Image (cartoon, helix red, strand yellow):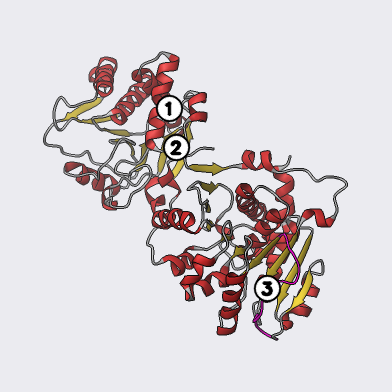
């Protein structure tokens, strides 16, 4: 599913008006109907609702919702901010007049032009935030900042229409986070905004529900975007059933360079992840101390011993593999660092780099320029910052990832609650599966194995990484059904990879 920018949604809305031969007022009625239905379904008529409406079309939405709720027996209190006087948008002005005509003196309606004394609010109240929508381009200032801070500290349950007032739909660097509404519930239109997927914005968005405004389908399909949300249907459409005459070599060969003394579990999990995701043949290159562990824990995998007993010190690719992945549990020592260095300098085919392979590169940043084009790196936030400098937010990391992905011609998997796959063409795929229980040791090693297996099976390069991330998250969701998010282990995720594939192929 596409994640549209504010400008993209505006163009789609304009096209909808044109094709359906309706006005913006008609579209606002449609939006307000969807919002009011949500509010009515959650609270009884006895609940106190306090609406704060701004002077633009977001305010028009709020006023229309207040009118519709009044018609259903509610008695909303409405504050319309017209600070500059006579600066209401045409739709806001029209909906102000409709509300007054419908409710008259039966509700408390105050149009704020100069001085404003806010109503007393507490935890028993519902505040409907309709101050500013996705048209906001600059941080809030003046009296609006005081109002936002008052609402945030009131204890009331806050519902934001479309987007929390004060927030920008995409990038919020430079915004004043003190002056953004902290919504408990955001009722957004058509698709979540990109900003909703960043961890630092969760406190503003709260729970989020997308309301379908039935915008023009052709325009939704044709309007370009660089951002996509990957859902089950997307994966279902790409996954292919097995050919009944297939043999293991048709399913690709994976070489995993992983593990060290005391960290062989990472190699075990990566190997099991690759096998569960369908790789035909998996070979693990690891220190000699890992032989018995690997042969016992993963008898389905081949073992290739390093010349060293406890560390990987030489990466000598003796055969041709569909994909080579390295990093899980390698440990960063001078010997391993040199081995990774020589591998990257001499290996010319795309590969997958994770965990300690990335930490080795961080020790020698010049290696970034030698990573083979079309390779995949899978850093979590700390590893990403070691590679590319300190960042303070998910938004900053995504922006940097877009730049360096294009610069080095590599795919970057930014691991997190919403794992984001960044391609060299600046396309970003946001994953929708997964849960907090997956923040557990070894989860990333499983992901390395799953992605490697899908690359080995010749899924399109554009999709193999995205598929792997989704299936890994879905396996975590299935594991959580049995173990919960507190008790989940990485091995539980591995055990559900096959079930996840079955689930998406139904």
- Rendered image: mark on residue 4: 2
In percent of width and height, residue 247 lies at 85, 53
Q: How many marks?
A: 3
Q: CA distance from mark 3 to mark 2?
A: 41 Å
Q: Residue at x 52, y 29 (%)?
A: 221
Q: In the rendered structure, does residue 314 fall within the stretch colored magenta?
A: yes
Which residue bears the numbered disc 3? 265
In percent of width and height, residue 7 lies at 37, 34
Which mark sits nearer the N-terminus, 3 or 1?
A: 1
Category of crowding for the residue at label 2, using alpha-carbon neighbours closer than 10 angstroms: few (below 14), some (14–19), many (at least 20): many
Residues under numbered marks 1 and 2 in contact, where contact means CB atoms less than 8 Å apart: yes
Residue numbers of the magenta segment? 309-322
- Along the line of sight, the residue nearer the viewer: 497 or 121: 497
Q: Residue furthest right?
A: 245
Question: Relative to 343, is 415 on the left or the right?
Answer: left
- Along the line of sight, the residue nearer the viewer: 328 or 226: 226
Question: Relative to 341, is 398 on the left or the right?
Answer: left
């Amino acid at each position: 599913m596409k994640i549209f920018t504010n400008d993209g949604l505006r163009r789609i809305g304009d096209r909808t008006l044109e094709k359906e031969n309706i006005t913006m007022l008609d579209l606002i009625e449609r939006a307000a109907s969807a919002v009011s239905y949500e509010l009515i379904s959650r609270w009884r008529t006895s609940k106190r609702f306090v609406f704060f409406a701004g002077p633009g079309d977001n305010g028009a939405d709020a006023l229309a919702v207040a009118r519709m709720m009044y018609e259903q027996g509610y008695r909303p209190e409405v504050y319309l901010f017209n600070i500059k006087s006579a600066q209401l948008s045409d739709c806001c002005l029209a909906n102000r007049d409709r509300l007054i005509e419908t409710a008259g003196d039966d509700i408390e309606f105050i149009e704020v032009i100069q001085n404003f004394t806010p109503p007393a609010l507490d935890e028993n109240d519902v505040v409907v935030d309709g101050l500013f929508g996705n048209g906001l381009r600059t941080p809030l200032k003046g009296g609006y900042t005081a109002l936002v801070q008052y609402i945030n500290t009131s204890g009331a349950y806050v519902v934001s229409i479309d987007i929390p007032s004060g927030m920008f739909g995409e990038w919020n660097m430079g915004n004043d986070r003190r002056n953004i509404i902290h919504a408990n519930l955001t009722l957004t239109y058509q698709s979540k905004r990109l900003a909703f997927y960043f961890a630092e914005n969760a406190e503003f968005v709260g729970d989020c529900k997308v309301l379908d405004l039935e915008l023009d389908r052709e325009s939704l399909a044709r309007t370009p975007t660089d951002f996509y949300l990957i859902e089950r249907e997307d994966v279902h459409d790409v996954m292919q059933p097995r050919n009944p005459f297939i043999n293991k070599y048709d399913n690709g060969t994976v070489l995993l360079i992983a593990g060290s003394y005391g960290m062989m579990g990472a190699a075990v999990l990566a190997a099991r992840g690759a096998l569960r995701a369908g790789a035909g043949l998996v070979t693990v290159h690891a220190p000699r101390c890992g032989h018995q562990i690997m042969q016992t824990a993963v008898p389905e995998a081949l073992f290739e011993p390093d010349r060293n007993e406890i560390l990987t010190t030489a990466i000598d690719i003796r055969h041709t593999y569909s994909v080579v992945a390295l990093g899980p549990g390698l440990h960063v020592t001078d010997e391993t660092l040199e081995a990774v260095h020589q591998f990257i300098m001499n290996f010319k085919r795309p590969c997958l780099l994770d965990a300690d392979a990335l930490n080795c590169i961080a020790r020698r940043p010049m290696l970034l320029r030698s990573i083979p084009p079309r390779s995949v790196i899978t850093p979590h936030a700390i590893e990403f910052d070691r590679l590319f400098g300190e960042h303070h937010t998910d938004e900053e990391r995504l922006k940097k990832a877009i730049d360096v992905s294009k610069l080095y011609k590599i795919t970057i998997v930014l691991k997190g609650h919403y794992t984001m796959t960044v391609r060299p063409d600046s396309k970003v795929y946001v994953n929708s599966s997964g849960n907090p229980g997956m923040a557990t040791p070894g989860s990333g090693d499983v992901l390395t194995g799953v992605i490697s297996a899908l690359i080995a099976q010749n899924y399109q390069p554009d999709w193999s990484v995205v598929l792997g991330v989704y299936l890994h998250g879905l396996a975590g969701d299935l594991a959580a059904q049995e173990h919960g998010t507190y008790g989940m282990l990485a091995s539980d995720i591995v055990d559900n990879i096959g079930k996840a594939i079955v689930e998406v192929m139904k």
